[in-house]
Amino acid sequence: MTNLKQSVASICLGLPLAFGALTLSAAPVAAEGVVNLFHRSAAEPMRKPRMAMWNYCADKLDIEIIENYSPPKQYEVQLPVQLSSSTPPDIYAYWAGGRSQFQAATGKIRAMNDVWDNIKDNFPEGVQATSTEPDGNIYTIPTNFQPNVVWYNKRVFAEHNLSIPQTYDELLDVAATLKEAGVTPFLLGSKSGWEPLLWFDYFVLRVAGSDFRTGLMAGTESYLDPRVIEAMELWQDLLEKEYFNDRTASLGWQEMATRFISGEGAMEIMGTWTVGNFISGGMEPGTDFDVFEFPQIKEGIEMAVEGVVEGWAASGAGENTENAVAMLQCITEREPQELFSRQAQRMAANKDVPVEIYEPASFQPTIEKFHDMLESPFHQNLEMATHPGVTEVAKRELPRFLAYPDQYMTVLEQLENRRKDVFGDN
């Protein structure tokens, strides 16, 4: 029988992000054989897969789960409240790649270094590297990953006799051909603020490389470094050539998908969550759309991949920490991650989960490409990789840059000022 009790957050998705609008049931008292779990999933299509994974381990370890959750939009507001309570959750959903290190400064996250050697081989090297924070510690146990890649409309490419660009110069040639034909080469919105961050990440990775980009996210490198300036100038060039759609502020990732499906735009950088839009819009994976890596800009710079690794952390603040650590080790195994990924159709971090579980079957070759990408360095995207204070500025300033590309230095100066504020003048 499933070892599960619910302590459900009664929160409407439409409520504003205000503490006064949020109510959760009182946190349960810690007890032997129990773990208190807090996560972001009000919608059943995501809650059920996550709990299938956790229930597998609960049954295996004879531990009772007391579940508490919040809708995704409210989760980041509610999590600090929960962690600061007298009975914080033993386990909570979180992200690897930088945020966890800043969470450590609050004392509300437990380093998992003591068990990492026993479980790290369940993951490909790219996920292992992303799970290791700049301070050298492991805080978040990964369960799934989503690379951000270039999606391209194969119908549009075929209509204009275009091939996948292997170099940046070839990408520019493709863009020029499409624009001349009246097709928007690159789709990009900024309605949520985070969408342009994916482009910034790739330009920095391709111009400056993985080590520099890691240092930039950790606050040891400067946003006024000549390599970052060069990256922004390359992006400015694309904008001034009108290779992007206009009115970016009115588009989000779903509106971008609509234009992609219609053939109004040919390419976009986005995560795997957009696939459902393409398929529901009548596109067949591999036939009507596919992916390629953002092309090389400079020789000698490794083709790193940017995306997101999701996972779970232990607060280490209650009497159930030993149970929490045991559960976190358990969910790294193939069986629980396969349960989650089969139901949620998100790519498991565990490298032994078979590609055959993903649907439709026509998308499985693309999944294989994603796995091949993990042989290169894998970086958590900027939103998750650096200090939230820097992310806040990036989500404000990079959308503004799309409208005023000649003001890129002002954008970088704003980012640099915030970097100094939160990291110090390194």
Image (cartoon, rainbow, N blue to C red):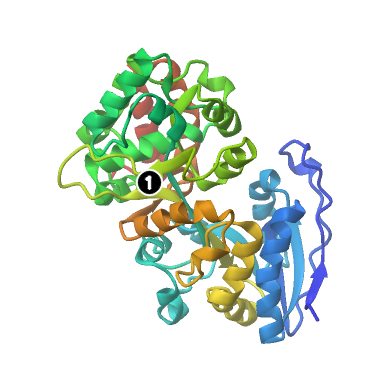
Q: Nearer the viewer, residue 307 or 282?
A: 282
Residue 140 visible here: no
Q: Which residue is mark 1?
A: 423
- For image coordinates 58% across by 78% down, the residue present is 330
Left-right relation of 291 to 280: left
How crowded is the residue under tag 1: few (<14 C-alpha within 10 Å), some, or many (20+)? few
- For image coordinates 61% across by 44% down, the residue present is 276
Disc 1, SS: helix
Left-right relation of 109 to 202: right
What's under tag 1, amino acid-wise?
Phe
Based on the displayed image, in which of its 4 quarters is residue 266 positioned? Answer: top left
Left-right relation of 395 to 323: left
Q: Is residue 412 above or below residue 364?
A: above
Q: Position of residue 395 (x, y in %)?
A: 49, 32
Based on the displayed image, in which of its 4 quarters is residue 426 positioned? Answer: top left
Residue 404 visible here: yes
Q: How many marks?
A: 1
Q: Nearer the viewer, residue 26 or 241?
A: 241
Q: Is residue 183 above or below residue 53?
A: above
- For image coordinates 57% across by 64% down, the residue present is 357
Q: Nearer the viewer, residue 294 or 134?
A: 294
- For image coordinates 29% across by 43% down, the residue present is 205
The N terminus lies in quadrant: bottom right
Q: Position of residue 72 (x, y in %)?
A: 67, 48
Q: Position of residue 333 (x, y in %)?
A: 53, 77
